[in-house]
Image (spheres, helix red, strand yellow):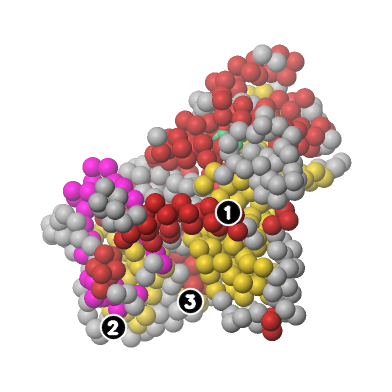
Amino acid sequence: MHLSVSNCGILVGYSAMAVSNISFVVLAAFACARIILSGDIIVSGQSQGLVQQCSTNIIADEVEQMFSLDKAAASSMACSCGKPLGVAGVSLKTEPVEIPQRQNEREREFLLASMSQLPSTSSPSFASPVARFFLRSGIAELHIHEELEPKRPDSFDLRTTQLFKLSPVHAVCISASPEAKEKTTYSTGILIQFRNEKECSSFSRAFEREKNKVSAHDSDLPNKILSVSKSTFDEKTDPSSAEMYFHYYGQLLHQQNMLEDYVRTGTYYAAVTENQADFVGRVVVDVGAGSGILSLFAAQAGAKHVYAVEASEMAAYASKLIAGNPLLSQRITVAKGKVEEVELPEKADILISEPMGTLLVNERMLESYVIARDRFLVPNGKMFPTLGRMHMAPFCDQNLYDEIANKALFWQQQAFYKVDLTPLHEPASQEYFSQPVVDAFDERLLVAQSISHMIDFKSVKEEDLYEIDIPLRFICTNGSQIHGLACWFDVLFNGSTTKRWLTTAPGEPTTHWYQVRCVLSQPLDIMPGQEITGRLHMMAHSAQSYIIHVTMSTELRGPGAEQGGNPQTSSAKCNLNDPYLRMLQPQGFSLAQDHKPHRDGQIQSLIEH
Ligand SMILES: C[S@@+](CC[C@H](N)C(=O)[O-])C[C@H]1O[C@@H](n2cnc3c(N)ncnc32)[C@H](O)[C@@H]1O
């Protein structure tokens, strides 16, 4: 099953393989529906061979009421396909206050204001519900109970429970019904409303964390209740996405594309050779070795031994390349497999890797880098690169805006083979604006000083990368329009001898990552000195990418604010997995070499064909 989520600022589901068959059916039910809530949430997907089994019967009235939707949107969400699923849900109106963890207990509690069951009942089930995670006999559970009656909870076994965030403050939690075989009901579920986004995010992070504990613990269970224990990679990645991904990297032409990016490969070479002291006599792990180039660099720099870990079929080519360099090959071992799964005979003094995707985090390989750190690196070991920064700034680009807006003009034809296409103009336009634009642009298009968000690879937790939330605040340097948010990244090699940055900034030599721009369908008018605030929210999804939600507002603050009009807000939602690859040369800047399209874009077109 390939489950994808588009145009929404929320994560709908992680790997279908991570859940029981029952939850799998539920995922399929979500996947086979296209749900649009007030233009705010769009859930889309395909299921293969499971559509006939799947169904949802979330009650339209309930949905309408919860999300203040019109009837059509509510019915759309409450869609039912195939057999009734019999989702017995609970609607929660929450006052979620996180209670501090009790000592010596592996549990987390969230205070909720009220809750009611689905199918719709107007009165709440519990006046003051509490949601509570804990581990009992090695099984992680979520209990929802009346505050004063913890002994009578509605309980959910996290092994067979999935959480779907529906909006920044709503989530639905669906679990395999224990009586599923005897009854027509496949699943039970609750609809949860949180008081604010922070609590909702905190709850979903706790949910993922506790669920991961289940898989870690499963392999320890003497009776192996769940016999198959998957690595985190398999848990969170759609199998078809992983297959495409490693197929792509298994091809020499794509490795060549990266090797030929001289900014990238040259900076790695310089960072290693200038910091030989960090490599001489050291054990190195190359995380995602690809062709083995970084392993060879590390061996050249005097590493005692290098373990080149590569999951794709490229591992065989890496072995061949390394064998062909006999002065180095004695000190390099290729290990074929995922860094989440391979076993190595010794710990590493230093990790080297190139895990960066578009906007730093696309492909979600940074998570594998972090897992490799936790599995293989000695305490206080080095990481090359050591940290990364995402940079953001508003931009003004009327040409780009017009180009995107004009793409949807096709749908304004009223007599296309005598068919009026105009009803689809608005959704087509939305679709075009939801594609992040990947190209190299002139830095003069930026209308404010950039801000940055740092990710320290030595300390970041894997889960921290599931959801990235960055507050935005800019002071505009010139008056014009804002057409969106431009983003790029850099990484630091913090060597003992020299520090070296690899940057993908506009105005710097172009790399195969280019830059990324999220375009607002409604531009903002601004005056010089005016303040812009907002948020960049990124939610990871199982196709190894992120849904990006950008919100920007003009403020009546700053020297130019009085001349500005009323405060305005505009937003954009993009799927980083679905870029518009617009490889225009930047104005006033000529590329030093003919770069090939970005690797993520190529992965995407591979997936599409
Ligand atoms: C961006 S390429 C870099 C290749 C090489 N290190 C270089 O710099 O040219 C990332 C490589 O990591 C591999 N990879 C990604 N995730 C992995 C994982 N979890 N375990 C092992 N290899 C992985 C991919 O197959 C790909 O070959």
Mark 2 or mark 3, earlier in chain = 2
| Residue type, numbered disc 1 | Leu
For discs 1 and 3, the disc positioned in front in the rendered view: 1
For discs 2 and 3, the disc positioned in front in the rendered view: 3
- Cα separation, mark 2 vs mark 1, equals 50 Å
Query: In this rendering, would 115 be left or right of 283?
Result: left
Mark 1 or mark 3, earlier in chain = 3
Q: Residue 126 placed where, x, y %? A: 31, 82
* Residue underneath mark 3: 196
Mark 2 or mark 1, earlier in chain = 2
Question: Measuring 39% from the left and 71% from the top, which residue is drawn there?
Answer: 170
Q: Are marks 2 and 1 in contact (CB under 8 Å)?
A: no
Please state the extent of the stretch shown in magenta in the rendering.
40-67
Query: In this rendering, would 108 be left or right of 557?
Result: left
Q: Are marks 2 and 3 in contact (CB under 8 Å)?
A: no
In this view, the residue in front, 413 or 242, is 413
Task: Specify whether residue 458 is in view.
Answer: no
Element at badge 2? loop
Q: Residue 68 placed where, x, y %? A: 34, 78
| Residue type, numbered disc 2 | Pro
41 in the magenta segment: yes
Tag on residue 400?
1
For label 1, the crowd category at 10 Å Cα-Cα, with few meaning under 14, some 14 to 19 and many 20 or more, is: some
332 in the magenta segment: no
